[in-house]
Image (cartoon, grey):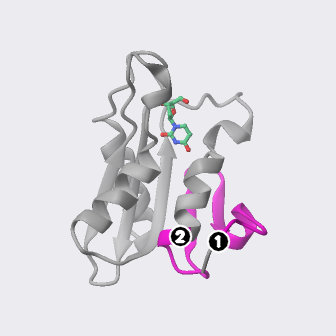
């Protein structure tokens, strides 16, 4: 199994933990860090819908919490239907902004059922104070 496939497998497994009683849309993310550690996250919804947080941000914030440097990310929307628009597998805009901040500029994002994208492709001309 390639390292990309292993990271996608970790993302799919993380999706099983999703707390998504409102959308029933399970999402998992896995981040490989500079020391080789893989940190995962899943989406966590709330009855106050706007408080929901996406899998990608949970995974990236977990890296920060653990003092780890994110290098590469994989995301899997395991409930995306075969005939659904491919966009239903793509990371949302808020997650792209957080990826830009916490992943290296040339980081690869592996999107299950889509392929590889670089941060610049996902968020051209993103907001930054740096
Ligand atoms: N979701 C993610 O976890 N990541 C994304 O990039 C897009 C959407 C979650 C949020 C919500 O729990 C569910 O998918 C449906 O929007």
Image coordinates of residue 19 in percent, x first then y, are 32, 28
Q: Is residue 88 left or right of residue 70?
A: right
Give the foreground label among 2 and 1: 1
Report x, y in % for residue 28.
Answer: 40, 45
Q: Earlier in the sequence, mark 2 or mark 1?
A: 2
Pick out the residue farthest to the front.
Answer: 129
Instruction: Give the position of the C terminus as an image quadrant.
Output: bottom right
Q: What are the residue bounds of the magenta stretch?
A: 101-128
Can the viewer see residue 37 in this picture?
A: yes
Q: Is residue 113 visible?
A: no
Q: Is residue 40 left or right of residue 90?
A: left
Q: In this orientation, which residue lies closer to the viewer: 98 or 14?
A: 98
Q: Which residue: 44% across, 52% down?
A: 57
Quarter assignment of residue 39: bottom left
Query: Which residue corresponds to the image point at 39% horizontal and 60% vertical from the top-left?
Result: 60
Residue to which mark 2 is pinned? 101
Residue that carries the numbered disc 1 in the rendered image? 128
- Indicate whether residue 106 is drawn in magenta: yes
Q: Residue at x 27, y 84 (%)?
A: 35
**CB contact under 8 Å: marks 2 and 1:** yes
Q: Which mark is residue 106?
A: none
- Against 80, is 103 above or below? below
Q: Residue at x 28, y 75 (%)?
A: 68
């Amino acid at each position: 199994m390639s390292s990309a496939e292993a990271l996608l497998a970790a993302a799919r497994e993380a999706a099983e933990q999703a707390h998504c009683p409102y959308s029933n849309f399970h999402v998992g993310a896995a981040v490989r860090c500079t020391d080789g550690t893989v940190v995962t996250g899943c989406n966590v919804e709330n009855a106050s819908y706007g408080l929901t947080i996406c899998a990608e941000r949970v995974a990236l914030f977990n890296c920060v919490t653990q003092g780890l440097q994110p290098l590469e990310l994989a995301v899997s929307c395991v409930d995306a239907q075969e005939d659904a628009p491919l966009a239903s597998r793509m990371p949302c805009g808020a997650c792209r902004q957080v990826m830009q901040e916490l992943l290296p500029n040339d980081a690869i994002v592996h999107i299950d059922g889509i392929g590889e994208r670089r941060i610049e492709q996902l968020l051209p001309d993103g907001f930054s104070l740096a």
